[in-house]
Amino acid sequence: MRPHFVAAVLLAGPTLAQAQDMCKAEPPPAVKPAPPVSPSRELRRITLSLLGTTPSPAELERVAAAGETERRQILDAAIDSALASPRFYEKLVEFGHDWISIGEYTTGAQGDAYQGSMAGTLYTCGAGTNHAGAYFSAYELGDRDARNVCNDLDENGAATAYPTAQVEPWWAPGTMVSVVGGLATQTSTYSDRMGAIHDCGVAYGGYYDPGVGRGCSCGPNLVWCVPFNGLGSGSSSSGALQRRHPWDEPARLFAHLVWHDRPLSDLVLGNYTVGNNMLRALYVRLGRQTGDRRTDGTTWWKPAQDASPRDPLSTEPGDIGAWREFVVESLEPQLLALSPNQAPSGDLSRSYHFDPRTMPGAPIGLPAAGVLTSIGAMSSYPRERVRAARWLEIFACHEFQPPPAEIHFPPYSGDPATTGPCQHCHRTIDPAAIFFKRWDFGQAYYVPWPFIPGLEPYRVAAVQLSGQYPYNGLPYSRWRDSFKPGTVLTPITMDQMRTNPETVFLDTLDPGQTLLGTPGDGTIGPLGFAKILVRSGEFDRCAVRRLFERYAGRPLDPGKEVGYIDALSERFVAGGRLVKPFVRELLRSDVFRRGF
């Protein structure tokens, strides 16, 4: 049984009057409050809520035998000790998964995700070969069997000499691995059969294995490649473990913010996140695949050189599994930091405006917005309306229910937000979904790779919205069918779309439009949605409801206890949206100490 469910059995919540008294220091309520629980039972609640464990018999006996002053000191010390325990961080990660529920990381509808790493696949030469244990590229010999490289044979079986080298790989800093063939060179471009020149850092699609070009290196420290086959679903394979990390990221970021006393609003407003080496590699590869042509850096994969805040479970400086903080733009330049010197920030002043109806060219990127622009969340929710609905449920505590049977709607005429019975939900979903258009999946032979449409190098032309071959499949057909001019989701005219087809990706609210009763400020993308969430107060009201249910043990009723919820959220905001002080105060309150 989970600790917050146990606490729900042990704790009765306050009446509205009692709650207002706790938070606003109003006169005592007329209703007689329940008596306090015993000290040993209170200690049990504290440890169950924060650590998921029970106190030792000695601890229970000590608090039961103590006088009032000593008893309060013991209980307060138990709260502070639990909040400082790495075990509390572990429970925060569990809480994060319960609250910010996303599905598995995939790349497209098939769900196979063989190529989700977006990196070139490496294999090792077998025992008994000329280069036993050395890494070679899956496409070293083009479509021929690349294993010939291990025995110094060319694609026709003729003897040849391949270069070798020792390289410090990004996945094992401080060690050296052997490489053979193109991997041992510093080759950064290659020519295809038509003579066109390509960047070796941009992997191309295969059936199971993406690859770098024939004769290519894998860049500095092999950062363009991975030492395993894609992101398969095997539970113990390296690829499957890397596939898990994008799913883990939102919960880890939540735990990181709480542990390091950061504002909880950075969960949706922040330009930074956390990641271990494997997750960071995915961001680096996404950046490379979507236009970044830097050398990919030499420090993101060296945790011993990284002084950024990290999780409390990773105490060794060189632990590549440590979840360490990083500004997303430093690894994926199209997810904009919008802060001086790319400093970590969750400030509401971060903003970027781009209106394709009046501004030529393409936006320089998409503002980073905490979990809302995390790879796993965007890929788990593969459509803009689904993304909007899930985030409204998670961060605004919005519940989507079917309309009452007696309500009649006008016939559907092309816009689910304004006509037909679907408007019951879509009048809320679509103004939110407009912020989530710029993330999709481009076909890479077998499994699609994520990309940001309308940004370089993925500009969108009129023919891609025409339905003509070869643009009659995904994602083009979906854009054409979903982004209808004149709808709430796509508030443009047909003439504007004809003049500039990329106007269909308009991803901010027009002046005068509101969401959650709050207008936008012109910020594009998920950050624009996040700012509305926070400025409307819905994020804070939802957050205190989730925190109260987790640590006090029961859900708050937004109908009967709206005053208490508002009082809690005011207290939460006044405290800088810091979770640990809020929880500490809650666990020290008379409300928490009362029984049934």
Image (cartoon, grey):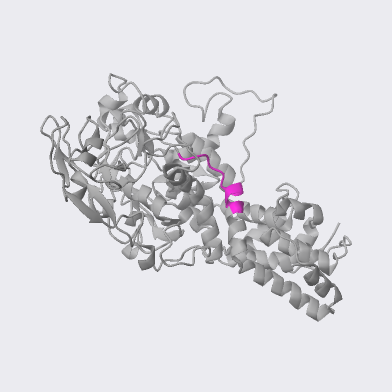
Q: In the rendered image of this protein, does residue 466 appear above or below residue 233?
A: above
The residue lying at 54 percent from left, 66 percent from top is 261
Rendered location of residue 454, percent (x, y): 30, 38
The residue lying at 38 percent from left, 46 percent from top is 524
The reply to whether residue 409 is visible in this rendering is yes
- In the picture as drawn, the residue positioned furthest to the front comes out as 128
Rendered location of residue 193, percent (x, y): 13, 30
The reply to whether residue 431 is visible in this rendering is no
Rendered location of residue 285, percent (x, y): 32, 46
- Classify residue 100 as left or right of residue 207: right
Instruction: Decide which of 240, 283 is in the foreground and name it.
Output: 240
Q: Quadrant of the C terminus?
A: bottom right
Instruction: Decide which of 422, 183 is in the foreground and name it.
Output: 183
Q: Inspect the magenta stretch and tell me whether residue 103 lies in it.
A: yes
- Classify residue 399 as left or right of residue 18: left
- Classify residue 176 as left or right of residue 542: left
Magenta stretch bounds: 94-105
Rendered location of residue 591, percent (x, y): 78, 63
- In the picture as drawn, the residue positioned furthest to the left comes out as 195
Using the rendered view, name the quadrant where residue 504 is placed: top left
Count of marks, rendered view: 0
Instruction: Decide which of 277, 417 is in the foreground and name it.
Output: 277
Instruction: Decide which of 385, 307 is in the foreground and name it.
Output: 307
Q: Inspect the magenta stretch and tell me whether residue 15 lies in it.
A: no
Q: In the rendered image of this protein, does residue 502 appear above or below residue 119?
A: above
